[in-house]
Structures are given as C-alpha cells and as structure tokens.
Image (spheres, rainbow, N blue to C red):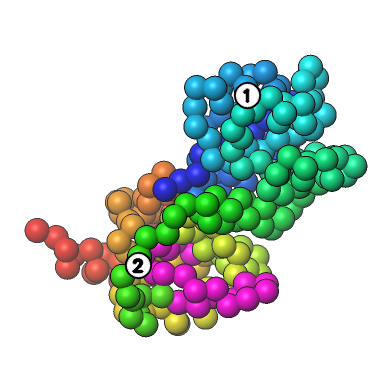
Amino acid sequence: MRNKCIIVDDEPLARQILRGFIQSMESLELVKECSNSFEAASFLHENNVDIMFLDIKMPGLSGMEFLRTLAKAPKVIITTAFSEYALEGYEYSVTDYLLKPFSFERFLKAVNKAIDSKQSSVPHTAKAKTNYEDFVFLKTDKAELKIELKDIIYFEAYGNFVKVHTEDKTILVSQTMKSIEENLHGDKFFRVHKSYIVSFDKIDKLEGNSVKIRDKRIPVGKYYKRNLEEAIKRYRV
C-alpha cells in the first residue's frame, strides 16, 4: 500500500524538490500540495494522509501553530531552514526534522522512519513460515537488512548505491547492481537495463523498449530484452 503524502510549504522551489523526491519512490503517493496552513487544514479535515511534510515559517499560521490545531495529525516530518525549531518540533511528536537544504538520502531516512513508526502502531498478525528462497539480506549503511522478495518491486542504480523499491518503502543499500543480480534466486527478477532489475510478477506491460510497472515506465536495454521476451512467451495463452 502506498503512503499518502501532503506537502505544506509556502516556497515553490521547496515544494518542487519534495515533489521530485516523493515521485521517485514507489511507496509514496503525493495527494496534495499546500502553500499555507489554512489550505492544509481544510484538506486534512476531509482526507486521510499518512505523512505530512511541514514547513515552519509560513505567513498567517506557522507550522507549529498549525500542529497545535490538529486533533489527530499524520506522521509529521518538519522541513525548515531554521534549526532552532527542532526541539519544539519534537515536543509535538514530530517524526523527524529535515534542515533545508537536505539530500535525498536524508529525506529517505526520514520517510522510512515515519513508515516504520506507522507500521509499529498496527497490530501484527501471524506470518506464514518462509523458506530461504523467499528473502534476501541487503547491506545498508548500518546493518544487514532482511527483505522478502514478494515485497520488492524493482531495484534502481543510484550512484554508488542501489534503491530498493518495495511495497512499503524505498531502501538505499550499499551494494552494486551486479552483486544483487548474482544473489537473487531463480527467475523471479530480470535485469532489463544497466540501471534496473525488476520483479517479473510486478510487470504490467512490455511495450517497445520499456516495461510498465504501476505508474512507472522503466527502460529495457537491447542486450536484456531477449531474455525478458522469452520469459513472457512462457506465459502466453
């Protein structure tokens, strides 16, 4: 399930940067952009949102004043150029605090913190036992993280890292595409481009030199296309 997000910031450039970050993640869906707190209050009164990116210094009603008016706030990530508001933000159970300008890596850390916090508040149901071919361990900056293969949508090269887009979140791992490809089991995943490995089960369409996965079009390189076409042929009726 994608996490619905709202941006509340009076600066067009700040909204543009956040919009780009959010739209690059399969686990997030941007449902509203607001330039002031009053517009955001009206929207939240009628709609459910999972994560709110909130600026502090805005005309009319500041971000902190706005937070005080909310009976039930979504997970809040503060985005501001003023570090002195950090302590006050944590008093309102803010999930994280992003000091502008911030990197995608720092943004991703805050988002995953919000998602983990949201999930920890939901009662867990018993999971079926999995065998060793149902998951992989991937190396992040601080740990070896276990990820179930069924939750992975695709892998995307990102400089010296790899973005792992899952059903719940996007994870940045410090491995190469080659090492990930070599350690994936069976025929569940296909390398379709030097920068992409996709879950075969998640592909909606192969059209020309791209595959469509949900709202994302992923390029397919000539070198990789034949293997993908052969796999698709096996499922034709």
Q: Which secondary structure type mostly characterizes the magenta part of the structure?
A: strand
For badge 1, the amino acid type reads Ala
Position of residue 3 in the picture relative to residue 125 (left or right): right
Asked whether the viewer can see residue 19, the reply is no
Q: Is residue 51 above or below residue 129?
A: above
Q: Residue at x 31, y 70 (%)?
A: 128
Q: Quadrant of the C terminus?
A: bottom left
- For label 2, the crowd category at 10 Å Cα-Cα, with few meaning under 14, some 14 to 19 and many 20 or more, is few
- Foreground mark, 1 or 2? 2
Outermost residue, right direction?
A: 84
Q: Which mark is residue 127?
A: 2
Q: Residue at x 49, y 64 (%)?
A: 155
Q: Residue at x 42, y 48 (%)?
A: 1
Count of numbered labels shown in the rendering: 2
Give residue 226's position: percent from left, percent from top: 30, 68
Q: Is residue 176 magenta?
A: no
Asked whether the viewer can see residue 86, the reply is yes
Taking depth in this image into account, of 45 and 222 the one nearest to the observer is 45
The region drawn magenta spans 136-155
Q: Which mark is residue 147?
A: none
Q: Residue at x 23, y 63 (%)?
A: 232
Q: Earlier in the sequence, mark 1 or mark 2?
A: 1
Q: Name the residue that disc number 1 marks.
A: 40
- For label 1, the crowd category at 10 Å Cα-Cα, with few meaning under 14, some 14 to 19 and many 20 or more, is many
Give residue 187's position: percent from left, percent from top: 30, 75
Taking depth in this image into account, of 145 and 45 the one nearest to the observer is 45
Give residue 14's position: percent from left, percent from top: 73, 36
Q: Is residue 153 magenta?
A: yes
Tell whether label 2 touches label 1 (CB within 8 Å). Answer: no
Taking depth in this image into account, of 229 and 91 the one nearest to the observer is 91
Rendered image quadrant of residue 182 = bottom left
Q: Is residue 147 above or below residue 13?
A: below
